[in-house]
Image (spheres, coloured by chain):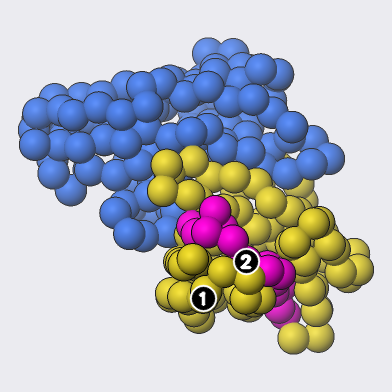
Amino acid sequence: SAVISQKPSRDICQRGTSLTIQCQVDSQVTMMFWYRQQPGQSLTLIATANQGSEATYESGFVIDKFPISRPNLTFSTLTVSNLSPEDSSIYLCSVWASGVGQYFGAGTRLSVL
Amino acid sequence: AQKVTQAQTEISVVEKEDVTLDCVYETRDTTYYLFWYKQPPSGELVFLIRRNSFDEQNEISGRYSWNFQKSTSSFNFTITASQVVDSAVYFCALSESQAGTALIFGKGTTLSVSS
């Protein structure tokens, strides 16, 4: 399995500000994934982050709103920019542990006022 | 198109009852992976099982069991003798083509177990 540390676990932010979420993995992984879970909903993939290249975004998600960094094989950040109440969600990072499955961080609960 | 359907939105049972959570998937790939996750009120996603498309053997882990049937594109999850701690949202998910790709999630089934 993979141990994923995600920070912060929760935050309350003001409209118009930004929040950066960090994801640290205890082993090197090629791809990291960022998901959003809106209240009462399922998980939706935001983007896939490969080390050394730009993230690949899913339809409906853009880099200006959700910039992602992937400086090395164990770390990634997701920034949610220009926050609005509609951005209130749980944000989760995940990695694929070879031969086992896909593991998720504990998530970041974001509330936007 | 790839799709995961969990038709049961909410299920309520009394402790010690058996309960089955249904999952139906759609994919054009011959190689794919199916997953079940548990999301308790704390919000974290707990990995329960992964099954690849070439392994149709049913799996049992304690009170949990999974029935994978390619003929009906289903991957159902049964909890035997349910307990209050089983109360959570359960997600079925699909990963296509090969290991290492992103997951497509069903909408989830909320299981409530009362004492």
Dot 1 amino acid type: Val
Where does residue B107 sit, x and y in percent of width and height? 46, 67
Quick one: which chain is blue? A
Instruction: Identify the disc placed on residue B13.
Output: 1
A44 left or right of B15? left
Could one spot residue B1 in this view of the protein?
no
Where does residue A85 sit, x and y in percent of width and height? 13, 44
Q: Residue drawn at (91%, 68%), measured in percent from left and top?
A: B57
Total numbered labels:
2
Q: Which residue is mark 2?
A: B82
**Does A23 sit above or below residue A95?**
above
Chain B appears in which tint? Answer: yellow
Give the residues in magenta: B73-88
| C-beta proximity under 8 Å, tags 1 and 2 | yes
Classify mark 2: residues with Cα within 10 Å, few (<14), some (14-19) or many (20+): many
Dot 2 amino acid type: Ser
Image quarter of residue A16: top left
- A41 is within the stretch colored magenta: no
Tell me the subunit letter for badge 2.
B
Q: Tell me the distance, in whole angstroms, between the alpha carbons under discs 1 and 2.
A: 8 Å
